[in-house]
Amino acid sequence: MTTVRRLLGLASAAALTAMLIPAPAQAAVPSTDPNAVLVAGPAPKTFTGVPDKWVNETLEVRNDSDKPLRVVLHVKTKGLWFASSYITCKYSDSLPPTKVPDVTDVEEAICQPPNEIEPGGSYKFGGGFIRTHPKAQPGAEYSYEFTWYTKEYADAQGPTWLGRDKLTHTGFHTLALMTKVTPETPYTGDNSSSGKVVIPAGETPPTTPPATATPEPTVTPTATVGPTLPPGDGEEEPSTPAPTSSSPAAPTTSPVAGGVGGGDDTGGGLPLTGTNVAVVGGLGAVLLIGGAGAFLLARRRRTSFSA
């Protein structure tokens, strides 16, 4: 009986001890999705679009793993265009520029950025990627979504993964490196994000190329020919600019010191402003000869009278 009581006491003590000691925490089960270490950003956004213009979106990703990673980007648009074509991307057929787009018009692309992204870092895609269609309609809403994958995961998938066997078009531009960014708000989703593009109701898509503006005729101002002054002491004679007009310029009459210039209405010649020297000289000679003759005649008469 004593032995039974002793055994019951030991069992009670063991049970009590087990209740007081916490059980060890179970180890977290690792995710089976290798892309769970990637977080896409920013959060879904809505942009105001203009027909045939780039959308100012950024396609970003954060690496939550403990090692550098190469990544692959998959983008799907509805009613939108891809803004540029890159060598390391493959594209589906493009929506014709003459077709009015709607949300059933889907385009896809898969791109491989050229550089790794560091652990804990947030990076954005190295180029502009989405553009509104030239025929985007006023009041319409278009959309896009993008997903990031590790390159290791993408390489392990089959040739039909994401329909990449049908993405037959490649680009010709070199894709720039992904650059590190500081997000406005931390990414909180998974490896996918999205965006919308809304065309304002008053935004009319272009129907014809803008007309080339007709240049205004160039008017060359006619040079104004001022009065030409004689050069003074130590001064250079100013040069008269040649008139650029094809019509002859009207003659300009310059005032002369000592009188007012004039001329007839026909404008045939220059005004006579100087003194006629020949006339004055002739009159002076006549007066001189006449005076000499009068002097001789008066002297002869005086001589005769004395005799």
Image (cartoon, rainbow, N blue to C red):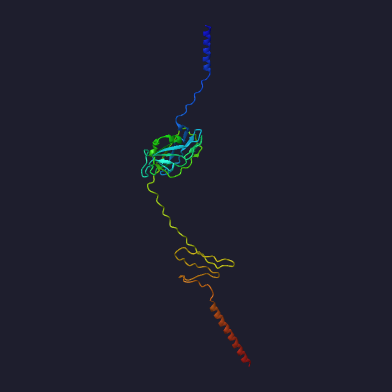
Closest to the observer, 180 or 300: 180
Check the image and name the residue furthest to the bottom. Answer: 307
Closest to the observer, 68 or 75: 68
Q: Position of residue 38 (x, y in %)?
A: 47, 34
Closest to the observer, 165 or 84: 165
Closest to the observer, 229 or 164: 164
In the image, is residue 206 above or below residue 297? above
Check the image and name the residue furthest to the top. Answer: 1
Check the image and name the residue furthest to the right. Answer: 306
Q: Position of residue 158 (x, y in %)?
A: 40, 35
Give me the residue at 52% from left, 14% from top: 14
Q: In which quarter of the image is residue 138?
A: top left
In the image, is residue 150 above or below residue 260? above
Q: Where is residue 120 in the image (x, y as percent from the top left)?
A: 51, 34
Note whether residue 300 is visible: yes
- Residue 239 relative to residue 143: left or right: right
Q: Position of residue 18 (x, y in %)?
A: 52, 17
Quadrant for the C terminus in the image: bottom right
User: Across the whole image, how many numbered discs are drawn on residues?
Assistant: 0
Give me the residue at 61% from left, 88% from top: 299
Note whether residue 199 is visible: no
Give me the residue at 53% from left, 16% from top: 17
Q: Quadrant of residue 199?
A: top left
